Structure formats: C-alpha cells, structure tokens
Amino acid sequence: MPVVSVFCKKGGVGKTTFLGYLAHYHAAKGQRVLILSADDQNSIFKIFGAEKFVGERDDNYFEHLLAGECQPNDIVFEARPDMYIIKTLNTDRLSLTLTLRRPQESKLRQLIDYFRRFFDYIFIDFPPSSSRLTEILLDLSDDILLVVGLDTLGLDGFINTIQYFTDSDIDLGKVRYIVPTGYHPIKLAPNTCLKKLKTQVKTYTPDAKIISPIKEKAVIRNLQEMGVSVFDEHQMPSKFHQKNRDEIKRDLLSTFSEIKI
C-alpha cells in the first residue's frame, strides 16, 4: 500500500493540517489509514483533539518500537474510525542513531513495510527541518506532496525543498503534486506568487501537478482549537461558522478529488 509524504522546508504553510484532513478524508471512505508523525511536536494530534495522548505515557513512542521495547499495537492510537496515528519522541536523537548505527535503518525500513500490510495508506508528517530520519522516510515514500505557501517566504521554501532533495539524492520524480495554500482570489500577492510557482514547477518538477490552490480560512484555526476535523459530523456553534466549515469541506473534497495516489 502506498506511503505518502507531505513535505516542505518551510513551517507554517498548513502542511500538517492538509495531511490530517487528507488522511481523514480517506478514512471516512472506509479505508484504513496510518499517520506517522515524524515531527516530535506531534502537532497532528491536536487537529483531532487527541493531544493528551502525546504525553499520556512515556513508553509508547515510535522509538520504543524501533528499539524492540514494545509491539506495533502498543504505539498505534486510533484518532478516528479507520485512522491511526503514531507519535515520535526525539527525532534528532533518532536521526543520530540512524546515522551511527546503520542496522537501525534496515529495521526502520522493515517496520514501514510491516505496516504496509495492514493499511491502505501510510501518511507521513514532517517538520520543516531536515534529518537522516526525514531522508530515509522520503526515500521510502511512493508519492510526495509538496505544500507551498503563496507568499515570498513560501516560494523560498519551495526552492529550498528542491535544493534539499537534490543535495540528499531524493528522487524529485516522486513529487506528484504541488499544494498551494493561503490563496485569496482578489488579493494581488497570492495570485502573483501562484504565477511564479507555476513557472518554478515547470522548471524543477515538471512531472508534478499543481492542484487547485487552497483558500485561506480563519475558521480552520477555530476547528483545530476544538479538535474538530472538517470531516467530523460536528455541529458548529453558529450558522456563520457552520456555513464556513461546510464551504471548507466542499473545497477540500474538490481538491482531494484531483489527487490520485
């Protein structure tokens, strides 16, 4: 089953939010989905109101499985029906271990292959920083989605990501989709940046498809504070917020229909 990475060498572009909703979208269709949080902030848990799980115990992180101290079932948390999340503890230390103890890399690859047998999709969430763990997981990925913010720093993040892939010998051919975020139809800056992004994509990732840009919506932050996903059957506190939530859901359904992974 496919391993799908959502990545960008720039923080704050909505990468984790996009991944969480994409994973929940597939789970809501009855597909079994696993999310591996390769970001030890484990922000993906907050999107689903499950942040208490991160610190609830200190013996059920991915590192404990890699060290042979627990079983796969011990570290998999069910955030929604058919959607599961694995947390990490210290990715810097884990990356150092992968660098200094080469057999650990083989074990990491074997664990990902093991989880492939039980899930229809494995999604991997990354921090904007790079590490040996990041390089291995990107190399393991079947498809990579790059999330790019539609502003000057966002475009810089795209170029930095391309440079990182090149320097690390990560196959740019795995980049299947470019996901522009922070779009506004009447604001000059996002539209200008979108045009520049299209030019850059043709140059650096010509085989990748730019999907329809995702609009900037403040209500998404409200949903995250409540631990509610747009694909939850949740009644919003006002008609205004309900309307906006429903609009976001419609937009995402249209966007996700463009992604074939």
Image (cartoon, rainbow, N blue to C red):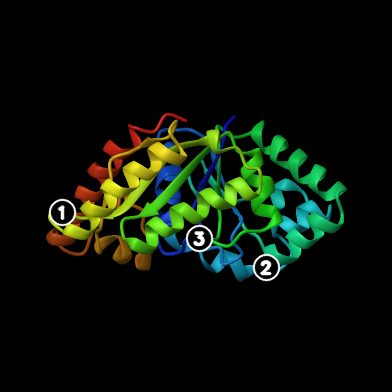
Residue under the point 81% across and 44% down: 107
Task: Judge depth for marks 2 and 1 and give the one in front.
Answer: 1
Neighbours of disc 2 within 10 Å: few (<14), some (14-19), many (20+)? few
Q: Identify the mark at residue 243; answer none if there is no mark.
A: 1
Residue 90 occupies quadrant = bottom right
- Residue 112, quarter of picture: top right
For label 2, the residue is 57
Residue 194 place in picture, x, y as percent: 28, 49
Disc marking residue 45: 3
Residue 196 against residue 55 in the figure, above or below? above
Task: Report the amino acid beneath label 2.
Answer: Arg
Mark 3 vs mark 2: in front: 3
Q: CA distance from mark 3 to mark 2?
A: 14 Å
Q: Is residue 103 visible?
A: yes
Count of marks placed on residues: 3
Q: Is residue 101 above or below residue 258?
A: below
- Residue 146's x, y, as percent? 45, 46
Where does the image place residue 26, in percent across and percent down from the top left? 43, 37
Say whether residue 89 is left or right of residue 232: right
Q: Amino acid at mark 3?
A: Phe
Circles 1 and 3: CB atoms closer than 8 Å: no
Placement of 20 over or under 41, stated as above or below: above
Residue under the image location 59 percent in, 29 percent down: 1
User: In the rendered structure, which disc, 3 or 2, sits on the residue that comes first in sequence?
Assistant: 3
Residue at the spot 56% in from the left edge and 55% down from the top edge: 126
Secondary structure found at label 3: helix
Labels 3 & 2 near each other (Cβ < 8 A): no
